[in-house]
Amino acid sequence: MARIFLAGATGVIGVRLLPLLIAEGHAVAAMTRSESKREALVEAGAQPVVCDVYDADALRDAVVAFAPEIVLHQLTDLPDRVEEIPQYSARNARIRGEGTRNLLDAAAAAGVRHFLAQSIAWTPSGGAPSLEDFEGSVLAFGGVIVKYGQLYGPGTYYESTLPTHPRIHVDDAAQRTVPLIAAPSGVVVLADAEGSEGNG
């Protein structure tokens, strides 16, 4: 069993990953930036870490103190409504850039041997220079990029309809991520097969 630092533990994938990791017997430090979510993380069986990814010193101290073997990066900065995504592009790009750099630096300081980060399996309109830079930095560290199809299912933008391909049910996305904590460095795409109706 491993010691895992899960950044983005209360996000749409993180909230599903956490109980799966706990059930496998891993020791998990679950990071959130919201103090109000601390108790829920304790109840889930994790060690809560309330920290802002942009506070590089506090983040490094938190990761080093937990001494994880693995860091899982499931951080995003996205709105509740899909039509507002364009207004959040700069915020999400900052998470991928500055946020990822801070998390990688913290992982390096803690001597982490494995780093896994969430990405997307499609190219957003207008291209994705921040996405390419972010993925490159993770791969340079020796980490794993997990490119998810568009998420659908409870708590996603597509609760009752199916998005276009590539897509994946959010529960499948979490379940298929767990084995990747031991995957070699590289890029993994998680998506339904073309033509599949999925779980939703």
Image (cartoon, grey):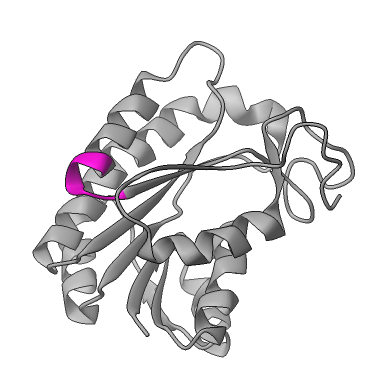
Residue 115, quarter of picture? bottom left
- Does residue 9 appear in this view? no
Is 100 on the left-hand or right-hand side of 13? left
Q: Residue at x 52, y 35 (%)?
A: 120
Position in image of residue 118 (x %, y %): 45, 47
The mark total stands at: 0
Name the magenta segment's main secondary structure. Answer: helix
5 w.r.t. 133: above or below: below
Is 194 on the left-hand or right-hand side of 121? right
Is 78 on the left-hand or right-hand side of 108? right
154 w.r.t. 124: above or below: below
Position in image of residue 94 (x %, y %): 35, 35
The N terminus lies in which quarter of the figure? bottom left
Q: Residue at x 30, y 68 (%)?
A: 70
- Does residue 174 appear in this view? yes
**Residue 27 belongs to the span the image colors magenta:** no
Position in image of residue 59 (x %, y %): 23, 63
199 w.r.t. 66: above or below: above
Outermost residue, right direction?
160
What are the residue bounds of the magenta stretch? 139-143
Q: Residue at x 23, y 70 (%)?
A: 63
Position in image of residue 139 (x %, y %): 26, 41
27 w.r.t. 180: above or below: below
Is 96 on the left-hand or right-hand side of 14? left
Outermost residue, top direction?
126
Residue 128, quarter of picture? top left
Nearest the camera: 31 or 118? 118
Q: Residue at x 19, y 61 (%)?
A: 107
